[in-house]
Image: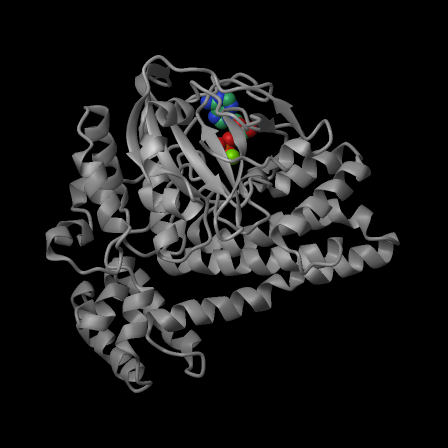
C-alpha cells in the first residue's frame, strides 16, 4: 500500500495525458533499491512481493495512483521540437516521504502514450540498468540526481537493431519538470499555463522564490552547482537537450552518459553527438544556453518587456560566477584544499598535464590521497614539480578521500554487467552496484573495479536508450 498525493495530476488540462502503463508478459524483479525505499517510507518487502512487482512492471495500477504522461517540448541538439512529452514513461504519482519531501514515482519503459510519436514506448534492459547504477553512484557522491527504485524485466522482446530483453525502470525524482515543460507552454503562447507552472515549481522546489525572475535565479544557481559536480567526476551527460534538464537541478535522463577514463576536455561518447556539442568541457556553456531558453519562457510573466529582458539576461549571466565558485570548491576538495588556497591554477595545471599524458581522471584524483597519483603519469618529473607546489598548500587527505571516488561506474564495467544480465546472470550488475554505491570505500575485494580499462576493453561510444 502506497499513499499517493498527485499534485501534478491536479494541474490544468493540457499539462499531461491520462494514460495507464501497458502490462507486460512476465515481470521479474531485477533490482530493488531498499535504501531508497526506506528513504521514501515505502515497504521494501511489499515492493518485492507480487503486488509490488506488478506495480513496478506497470501491470497493476495501485490505489491512489493517477498515471499520466507529462507534456513537454525541447531543443534537441539546438533544434526546437514543439512537442515531445513522455513517450515511454508514465508518472504513477507522487509520494511524500516521512521527512515531508515530495517525490515523483515514474515508470520508464512502460508502454506507448499519446506522446510516443513513432516509438514503441519501451526500453531495453541495457539503458535501464545503466541508469540504475549511474544515478545511484551520482547520489552516493552527493550529486543532485533522480534516483532508481527498481528495475523489472518484462519478459518481452524490444526491437532495436536486434531483439533485446525489455525492462522497466522505476525512477524517483523531486519532479520531472524540465526546461522543456516551460517551452511547451511558451511556444503555444499559453501564459496562464506558464503562470500556473511557475507557481507549481516555486511551491514545490523553490519556496523562497518570490516570482518568475527569482525562480530563474534559483534554477540558475542550482544548475551551476550540479554541473560543477559533473565536471568534478568526469561525467558527461551526453544529451543536454532542454527536455533533459530538470528545473529542480537534479541530473535527469541518463541516456548515453558516461564517465571519462583518460582525461581530455573534448571527450564525447554519445554516438549521436557528432559535433561534440555536449562534450565534457562544453557542459557549463550548454547549461547557460538551456537556461537562456528557460529565461525566454519566463520573460512574458515578468512585466514590462524591455526591463524583463534585461533582468532575465542578468539572471542567466549569474551562472558564471556561481559555477566558477562551485568549480573551485569541488576541485579544491579534490585537491584537499579549502577555499582559501589558490585552487584554480593548481587544478588547471594538473588537468593540463593529465590531458597531455593521457592520465586516468579518477585514478589520478583518487591517488592524490595515498601517494599513487604519480604512477598515472609518464613524465614523473613534471608531476613531482606540480606536487611540490601542491603539497606546499597543505592538502587535507580526508577532504580528498571524501571528494574523490576510488571507483566509478566505468563504461566497460557497465557494458560487462549488462551483457551478463542479458544472459540471465545478475551477479556482475549487483557487484558493480554495491561497489559504486560505496565509492569511497577502498575494499580490496573490489580492487579490479577501480582499474582503468585495458586497450581492448575501452568503450569508445555509447548509445541512447531509444
Ligand atoms: P530522450 O532521448 O530519452 O531524452 O527522449 C526524447 C524524446 O523521445 C522523449 O519525448 C521521449 O519520450 C521520446 N522517446 C524516446 N524513446 C522512446 C520510445 N522507445 N518510445 C516512445 N518515445 C520515446
Ligand atoms: Mg529525455
Give the residue at x 17% y 45%. Answer: 455
Of residue 357 and residue 200, the one placed in the foreground of this image is 200
- Looking at the picture, how far across and down is residue 214, in whole percent? 71, 59
The image quadrant of residue 373 is: bottom left
Is 138 on the left-hand or right-hand side of 31? right
Q: Farthest residue toward the bottom?
A: 392
404 to 20, vertically: above or below: below
Residue 81, visible in the rendered structure: no
Give the residue at x 38% y 42%. Answer: 37
Is 85 on the left-hand or right-hand side of 15? left
158 to 447, vertically: above or below: above
Q: Farthest residue toward the front?
A: 1
- Looking at the picture, how far across and down is residue 351, in whole percent? 35, 66
- Looking at the picture, how far across and down is residue 456, in whole percent? 17, 40
Give the residue at x 44% y 31%. Answer: 1
Of residue 261 and residue 291, the one placed in the foreground of this image is 291
Of residue 265 and residue 103, the one placed in the foreground of this image is 103
115 to 190, vertically: above or below: above
The image quadrant of residue 389 is: bottom left
- Looking at the picture, how far across and down is residue 210, in whole percent? 74, 58
Is 432 on the left-hand or right-hand side of 321? left
The colour style of the image is one colour
Give the residue at x 39% y 61%. Answer: 232
Which quarter of the rendered picture does the C terminus lie within?
top left
Q: Farthest residue toward the top?
A: 25
Badge count:
0
Is 414 on the left-hand or right-hand side of 76? left
Q: Farthest residue toward the left?
A: 445
Residue 370, visible in the rendered structure: yes
Amino acid at each position: 500500500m502506497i499513499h499517493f498525493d498527485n499534485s501534478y495530476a491536479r494541474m490544468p488540462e493540457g499539462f499531461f495525458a491520462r494514460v495507464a502503463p501497458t502490462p507486460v508478459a512476465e515481470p521479474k524483479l531485477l533490482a530493488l533499491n531498499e535504501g531508497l525505499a526506506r528513504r521514501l517510507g515505502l515497504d521494501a518487502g511489499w515492493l518485492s512481493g507480487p503486488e509490488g512487482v506488478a506495480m513496478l512492471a506497470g501491470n497493476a495500477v495501485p490505489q491512489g495512483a493517477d498515471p499520466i504522461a507529462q507534456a513537454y517540448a525541447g531543443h534537441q541538439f539546438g533544434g526546437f521540437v514543439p512537442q515531445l512529452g513522455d513517450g515511454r514513461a508514465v508518472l504513477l504519482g507522487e509520494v511524500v516521504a516521512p521527512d515531508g519531501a515530495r517525490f515523483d514515482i515514474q515508470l520508464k519503459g512502460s508502454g506507448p502514450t499519446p506522446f510516443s510519436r513513432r516509438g514503441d514506448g519501451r526500453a531495453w534492459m541495457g539503458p535501464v540498468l545503466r541508469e540504475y547504477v549511474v544515478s545511484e553512484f551520482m547520489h552516493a557522491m552527493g550529486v543532485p540526481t533522480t534516483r532508481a527504485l527498481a528495475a523489472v524485466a518484462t519478459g518481452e522482446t524490444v526491437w532495436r537493431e536486434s531483439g533485446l530483453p525489455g525492462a522497466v525502470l522505476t525512477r524517483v525524482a523531486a519532479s520531472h519538470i524540465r526546461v522543456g515543460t516551460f517551452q511547451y507552454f511558451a511556444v503555444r503562447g499559453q501564459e496562464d499555463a506558464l503562470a500556473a507552472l511557475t507557481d507549481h515549481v516555486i511551491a514545490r522546489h523553490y519556496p523562497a522564490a518570490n516570482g518568475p525572475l527569482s525562480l530563474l535565479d534559483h534554477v540558475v544557481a542550482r544548475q551551476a552547482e550540479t554541473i560543477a559536480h559533473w565536471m568534478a567526476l568526469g561525467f558527461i551527460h551526453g544529451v543536454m537537450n532542454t527536455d533533459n534538464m530538470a528545473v529542480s537541478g537534479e541530473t535527469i535522463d541518463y541516456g548515453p552518459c558516461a564517465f571519462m577514463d583518460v582525461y581530455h576536455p573534448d571527450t564525447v561518447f554519445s554516438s549521436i553527438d557528432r559535433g561534440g556539442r555536449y562534450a565534457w568541457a562544453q557542459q557549463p556553456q550548454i547549461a547557460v544556453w538551456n537556461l537562456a531558453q528557460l529565461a525566454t519562457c519566463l520573460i512574458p510573466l515578468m512585466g514590462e518587456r524591455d526591463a524583463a529582458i534585461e533582468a532575465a539576461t542578468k539572471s542567466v549571466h549569474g551562472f558564471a560566477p556561481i559555477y566558477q565558485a562551485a568549480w573551485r570548491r569541488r576541485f579544491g576538495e579534490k585537491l584537499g584544499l579549502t577555499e582559501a588556497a589558490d585552487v584554480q591554477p593548481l587544478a588547471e595545471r594538473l588537468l593540463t598535464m593529465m590531458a597531455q599524458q593521457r592520465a586516468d581522471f579518477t585514478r589520478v584524483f583518487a591517488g592524490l590521497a595515498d601517494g599513487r597519483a604519480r604512477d598515472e603519469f609518464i613524465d614523473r618529473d613534471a608531476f613531482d614539480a606540480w606536487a611540490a607546489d601542491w603539497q606546499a598548500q597543505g592538502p587535507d587527505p580526508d577532504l580528498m578521500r571524501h571528494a574523490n571516488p576510488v571507483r566509478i561506474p566505468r563504461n566497460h564495467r557497465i557494458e560487462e554487467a549488462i551483457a551478463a544480465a542479458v544472459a540471465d546472470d545478475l551477479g556482475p550488475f549487483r557487484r558493480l552496484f554495491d561497489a559504486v554505491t560505496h565509492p569511497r570505500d577502498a575494499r580490496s575485494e573490489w580492487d579490479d573495479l577501480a582499474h582503468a580499462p585495458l586497450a581492448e576493453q575501452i568503450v569508445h561510444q555509447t548509445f541512447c536508450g531509444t
